[in-house]
Image: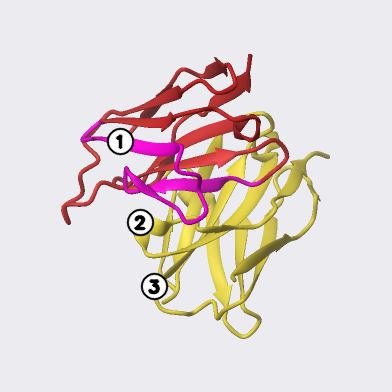
Chain colours: A yellow, B red
Amino acid sequence: QVQLQESGPGLVKPSQTLSLTCTVSGGPINSGGYYWSWIRQHPGKGLEWIGYIYYSGSTYYNPSLKSRVTISMDTFENQFSLKLTSVTAADTAVYYCAGGLKWELLFDYWGQGTLVTVSS
Amino acid sequence: DVVVTQSPLSLPVTLGQPASISCRSSQSLVYSDGNTYLNWFQQRPGHSPRRLIYTVSNRDSGVPDRFSGSGSDTDFTLTISRVEAEDVGIYYCMQGTHSITFGQGTRLEIK
């Protein structure tokens, strides 16, 4: 069974870069067909998809965040990561990593989520 | 951008009664491969979301059969045939035909 675990700082200063890592267990991250995504949820609000990295390494980002987002993967550590630059208070949210095999099965697996607060 | 609109946003339901949530898209969700990428998720209080339904009407493994999905093109529905206490939470539809967007969420509560 695939399991995901987010890690990273819970507090980031405005204008800095938010960096999170998702560690995947239960299978290789570069296993064929998998999409690995980041999703966030502002406090008390709905879900916002940030972007994904395909098992092959190709990426696709939410157009509204594209200029500030980079998702990468480390096959040796079996992890994928999120970098969000120039953060503001509006980026305060619970950040989830999620994975799924095939497009119709997006978000099969979820991490437990990690709260990131942007504040000085 | 494709906008996905759910209604109602709040849904009080009596235990044992049915419940329905509507999800409407600003564009057709039929993809060029013939599939309609409309999924439903449940988020219980304090938990990560969990997918219930994929491609409109396919129930995920372990999901009770009281949950069903239906619809086509731009108009979709999640139905719970008999609401149980464990169904309390927020329900989201998600389209994956034109990039990925979620609906605003529908909060289901017990009356």
Chain at numbered mark 1? B
Alpha-carbon span between mark 2 and mark 1: 16 Å
Q: Point out the residue furthest to the bottom here.
A: A76
* Residue B1 at least partly seen: no
Q: Is residue B96 left or right of residue A97?
A: left
Give me the disc on residue A104.
2
Amino acid type of the residue that numbered disc 3 sits on in the rendered structure: Gly
Chain at numbered mark 2? A
Per the image, label 1 sits on a secondary structure element best described as strand
Q: Is residue A1 left or right of residue A54?
A: right
The one nearer the camera, A117 or A102, is A102
Q: Quadrant of residue A64?
A: top left
Amino acid type of the residue that numbered disc 2 sits on in the rendered structure: Glu
Give the quadrant of the C terminus of chain B: top right
**Residue A65 horizontal/vertical position (percent):** 50, 46
The one nearer the camera, B83 or B109, is B83
Give me the disc on residue B70.
1
Amino acid type of the residue that numbered disc 1 sits on in the rendered structure: Ser
The residue carrying mark 3 is A33
Between marks 2 and 1 in the image, the one whose residue lies nearer the viewer: 1
Magenta-colored span? B48-74
